[in-house]
Image (cartoon, coloured by chain):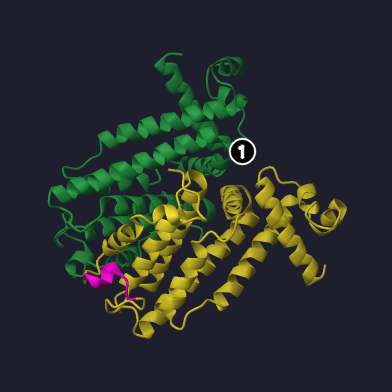
Chain colours: A green, B yellow
Amino acid sequence: MSDDTVDDLMEATYRALCKHGYAELTMQDIAAETDKSKGTLHYHFDGKADLLESFLGFLLDRFEDRLETLAGETPAERLHALFDELLTASDDDAEEFRTAILEIKSQSPYNEAYRERLTEFDRTMHDRIADFVGDGIEAGQFREDVDPDETAEFLVTVFHGAQTRAAAVDRSLERTRRYVHAYIDDLRVDDSSPDGDDASAADGTADASSAAETSATAEDGSENAGGDESEGE
Amino acid sequence: MSDDTVDDLMEATYRALCKHGYAELTMQDIAAETDKSKGTLHYHFDGKADLLESFLGFLLDRFEDRLETLAGETPAERLHALFDELLTASDDDAEEFRTAILEIKSQSPYNEAYRERLTEFDRTMHDRIADFVGDGIEAGQFREDVDPDETAEFLVTVFHGAQTRAAAVDRSLERTRRYVHAYIDDLRVDDSSPDGDDASAADGTADASSAAETSATAEDGSENAGGDESEGE
C-alpha cells in the first residue's frame, strides 16, 4: 500500500471507531468508510486486531509529529502547549474516540500487540515530558530540586486519569487541564508567570496545594462555559 | 434472595470476572462459581448487565463500609489509610479484577446503569476525600489555603490514572501511592510528618515538586522489592 492509502485507511479507522466503538467494530465497518472492499482490507491485515495495532502505531507517529511542532519558545511553554493538546477535546468526535481508546486500553491485558503499542505511547509521553522538564531546569526556568522523571511519571498518570474519568463518568478534562497548568507554573524558579494572571504566583505560595487553589479560582463560574466538554453533573 | 445469598452471588461474580474478564463473561460462568443454576440466576437478574449493575452496587456498599473502618486517629491519617487501600494490590486476583473494572468503565458510555453506578462511586470517593481534607483543616492539620474540593477532585483523577496505567501498560501502583502520601504530607500546616522519615519535610521545602522528590528518593532501589505488583518495564 502507498503511504497515502495507509493514511486514508487510518483515517477511516478513526471514523469507524467513533461511529461504532471498539467492541462492536468490524472490518466491514472500516471498509464502509473507504473506497476499498472488505476483501482488500483482509488482504493487507490479518483482521481487526492487526489493523487496530497498525492504527495505534499511526496514532503514535502522529503524536510524535505533533511533539515536534508544539507552540512555545521555551521548555515551559512547550510543556503547557503539550497539555493543552492532551487535555482538550479536539472535535465533535473526541468523546466517542476517547471511549474507543479506553476500550482498547482495557483489552491491552488480553492482547500483547496492543500492550506493546500502548506502552510505547506511554513511554514516549513520559520521556518527552521529562525532556521538557529537564530542559526547563537547564534553562533556569524550573527549580533545580524538581525531578524530571518523577514529574513526568506523575503527569502521565494524571493524563490517563483525566481521560478515564471523562469517558467513564463524564468528568470534564477542563478542571484537570487548569490544574496541570497551575502545577507546571509551580515548578518554576520564581513566582512570575508569563501570562501574569497566575493566582498561585501572585500570593507567593508555590506549594503543593496552590495548584489546586489556582484551579479552584479559575473554576468559579466558568465550569459551564466550556462548550466542547460534556459535563455529567 | 436472602442477604447471604446475594453476598455469595456477588463473591461468585468477583471470581468469575477475575477468571474470564468482563467481555467474555457469561451467566453460566458466574453460575459455575456458585451452587446455583444458571436458571436461578436468570430468575433474579435480567442478564449479565443487570447482574453486573448489582455487582457495582455491591462494590460501592463494600467501599462505604471500609470508609467507616479506616485506620487512623486523625483525618490526615485516615486519608493516608484510604490511599493505602485504593492503591495497593490486595491479592493475587487484583490484576485481573482491575482489568475487568477497566473494561466495565470503558462500557460505561454504552450503558446508562453502569454509568450511574460508576458516577456514584466516583462521587463517594471525592466527597469522602473532601471531608477528610476539610476535617483536617478544621483540626489544624492541613493548611487553611488548601481547597478540599479541588484536592479531592485531583486525587480521584490520580486514582483513576494509576488504575488505568496499571491495567493497560503495567505501571506499578507503588510509585503513585508513594507520590500521593508525599502529596498529602505537603498539605500539612507544618513540615513535621508523623513517621519522621519524610524527605520533603526534612528539607523544609513543602512545594509542588517535593512530593515528586520524596517519591523519587523512596523509589531508589525499592521499585523491584514490591512483590505484589507486576512491573512491565
Q: Can residue A218 be seen in this snapshot? A: yes
| Residue occupied by mark 1 | A23
Residue drawn at x 47%, y 80% as measured from the top left: B72
* Residue B182 shown left or right of residue A18 in the figure: left
Residue B12 occupies quadrant: bottom right
Residue drawn at x 51%, y 64% as measured from the top left: B86
Residue A225 occupies quadrant: bottom left
Q: Can residue B154 be seen in this snapshot? A: no
Residue drawn at x 35%, y 35% as measured from the top left: A63
Where is residue B204? Give x, y as percent: 21, 72
Where is residue A58? Give x, y as percent: 42, 29
Where is residue A168? Give x, y as percent: 53, 53
* Residue B198 shown left or right of residue B50 in the figure: left
State yes or no: residue B201 in magenta: yes
* Residue B216 shown left or right of residue B155 in the figure: left
* Residue B114 shown left or right of residue A202 in the figure: right
Q: Is residue A85 above or below residue A16?
A: below
Q: Is residue A139 above or below residue B134?
A: above
User: What is the number of callouts on the image?
Assistant: 1
Amino acid type at circle 1 is: Ala
Q: Nearer the viewer, residue A85 or A158?
A: A158
Q: Nearer the viewer, residue A66 or B102?
A: B102
Residue drawn at x 20%, y 43% as measured from the top left: A72
SS category of the residue bearing label 1:
loop
Q: Is residue A129 above or below residue B72?
A: above
User: Which segment did they paint magenta?
Assistant: B196-203
Q: Is residue B178 above or below residue A160?
A: below
Q: Chain of mark 1?
A: A
Where is residue A128? Give x, y as percent: 29, 41
State yes or no: residue B77 in magenta: no
